[in-house]
Amino acid sequence: MAGEYIILENSSTYPGFHSSSNGLANGMYRSAQRISTDRLVLLILLVSTTVIGLFAYWDVMVLNAGALPLSRGTSSVDYMEPGLRNETLAEKMHREVRVLCWVLTTPKYHKTRAIHVLRTWGKRCNKIYFMTSEPDDELPTVVLTKPDRYEMLWGKTKEAFVHIHEQMRHEADWFIKADDDTYLFLENLRYMLYPYSPETPIYFGFNYKMVGTHQKNESYMSGGSGYVLSREALRIFAEGVNDTTKCRQEDDHAEDVEMGKCLFNLGVKAGDSRDEQLRNRFYPIAPYGALLSGNVGMDFWLYKYAYYNPRSCMDCLSEYPVAFHYVHSKQLYVYDYFNYQFQLSGRAQVAERLPKKIREEELVIPESDNPVS
Amino acid sequence: MGVRPNRKRLELMLMLLIGLAWGILLSELMKRTRWQNHADRLKEESSPFPSSQRSRNLRTPPTIAPSTTNPPPDILAARLFNETRVLCMVLTSPKTHHTRAIHIKRTWGRRCNKLIFMSTKADKELGSVALNVREGYSNLWPKTRAALQYVYKHHFQKYDWFLKADDDTYFIMENLRAFLHAHNFREPVYFGNKFRQHVKEGYMSGGAGYVLSKMALHRLIKLGFSNSSICTNRNYGYEDVELGRCLAGVGVVGGDSRDEQGLSRFIPFSPLHWYPQPPDWYQPLLYYTSPDNSSDCCSNTAISFHYNNAQEFYVLEYIIYKLRIFGINRELGPLPKKKASSRPMSINLQTTKEENGHIALIKMMPRKNVTTPNYRTKTTSKFKK
């Protein structure tokens, strides 16, 4: 009762102040509450919009980054036939870098050497022909008119290349000559040739120093491990081989030396076939000899005649060799077994990619660096 | 009063929109994270076509759980190295320490978990063990016995498989481990190229090398070498024939090491010299007949070759481990599954010592009645060695 009385007294004593104070307090409270709520909502809205905007921008950027490969892939898939969609790099190279192989042989060796070439590495050429003096039902032969003697090797080689240019130059981009005791790794050859255009007048092989009187930086390619001419080099050779001032007209003398002289005089470049670590890829000997030569002295014949400094040791054999020489017919199957059938469990899968194309004006051929003479 | 309901409605709509936006955002992030993992795995598989890889990435949602994928080959080889521990025991002689054995150490011997050269003279450079036996081809059996006893005494606990090789044998240890991974070293089993003569259960060619499981070595030493009626302790005899007889006597099974096509993995000659047709002496010795009379001698997952000279070790090293064909990345299949124990093996595990001796005695009786002429064995050994 006392409390009640006190409250009533206060109210009656200051009615105006009380009413005014209450009104002001209510007004301030409402105003503050409204402002806080509005600000909070606005803040949330702004933050959310910003985050969503940033995410959308990032998403668009990612999509744009992926767009070009995606479209290229899509078009590539559309254009490729269904069977080729899962082709390996080797199969792609087989289509894009066409290699015609021609093998110099003789009827004496048709059954003991040439047929085994056809059954092993020969089937991986885009085209293969055996240049000989008699036809053979089991071999795709081209019969040459030159007599079958070793001294006529240069004559046979000239005739073979001219014949190929006249009859088969549209069948391939590159034209490689090999012996019937050569083993060629066609996939590694295509890998080596891929950066070069077949319209460049160039040829590759194992570079030897030129013999006899010669100009500086003149070399020739080993006949045994083979040499490969571009289509342009083949055309230049076929059209210029009858020039008496540039190429030997007689049929005798060493085929590879005369070939080197002729091509040099006709302006065909002698390319450097070594890999990025300057290791040879054409070997005029078999791996036995290449490995054994690490144990011989500096009087090893290869050290003397090689155009580029050969460093024969275990680490100096290339991972992607192109050619071995002095491989007898049984050994051909050994290379096929170990390189195409044999499986090494857990072998590291190398991410292989194609090298960059080299334009003709960018082509640089190093000079000889072999100091042995 | 009219303004208040409108504001509430606006607030509710705004909250709903914000929630939707956040949901979409998080959903996109989760999806992208999963795609990223898939793309990474595709890269590890080294697809040859980056563009098709990208399109495949976007079109095909990931359906494979990460735990079921095979590890990359590098990790696979390292895992096998640790999981399948192989001790390599190479029989050599002092005169071939530096013409043959040292080249094993520099080539395939590096890939053994442990490499020991068993000789009759110690060699610091080689790290060979000097066994107390006489040297010579006719003493190969006592030399092999001493070598196996040495290995059992000093290195039995640390290794699962025990490989014996000659100093002109080349082993591809990765293929050996991949093959052994499917088998259990606690089973009494050994592998090699199984020949059919002399021992009814077959014996493993010494030249191609053989590998004993831990249990096989244990039984051989504990049950066989202490019983001269099971394992002869005479100072002569062909090492692989005598060992085959011993192991059969103590219940060790001669396993089948051929591949799915029935081709041999342990090859008692060198394909560098004989390929694809094997030498003439080989086919009559084989325990298993060739399924389709194919002319192919060797498995694509070959494990060992015999009759290699020193330079051929390096040729094989180059051809097998370094030489590559561009654009041909042959995908290896998954590791073969562990084989369940066959019933005969489990029965053998429970066989007691007396029963083993009894069985061995019974098995030895018919052999005495059938005597092989001397000239035949000599001819055979000449070709084998």
Image (cartoon, rainbow, N blue to C red):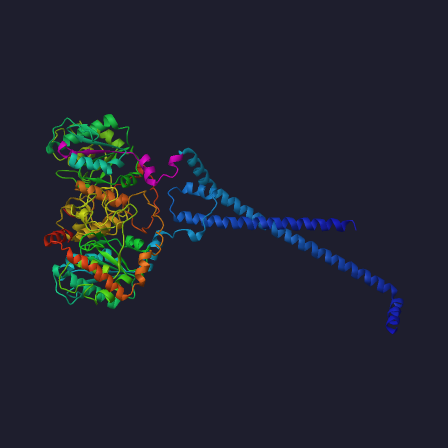
Q: Is residue A171 above or below residue A334?
A: above
Closer to us: A127 or A56: A127
Q: Is residue B16 above or below residue A155?
A: below
Q: State yes or no: residue A100 in magenta.
A: yes
Q: How many marks?
A: 0
Q: Is residue B66 left or right of residue A200?
A: right
Q: Position of residue A8 (x, y in %)?
A: 88, 68
Closer to us: B210 or B368: B368
Q: State yes or no: residue A127 in magenta.
A: no
**Quick one: which residue is furthest to the bottom in this view?**
A2
Q: Position of residue B28 (x, y in %)?
A: 54, 48
Q: Is residue A290 left or right of residue B176?
A: left
Q: Which residues are magenta?
A: A82-110
Hey, which quadrant is residue A74 in on the image? top left
Q: Is residue A44 visible?
A: yes
Q: Is residue A253 above or below residue B17?
A: above
Closer to us: A107 or B352: B352
Residue depicted at x 37% and y 52%:
B72
Q: Position of residue B124 (x, y in %)?
A: 18, 65
Q: Position of residue A363 (x, y in %)?
A: 29, 39
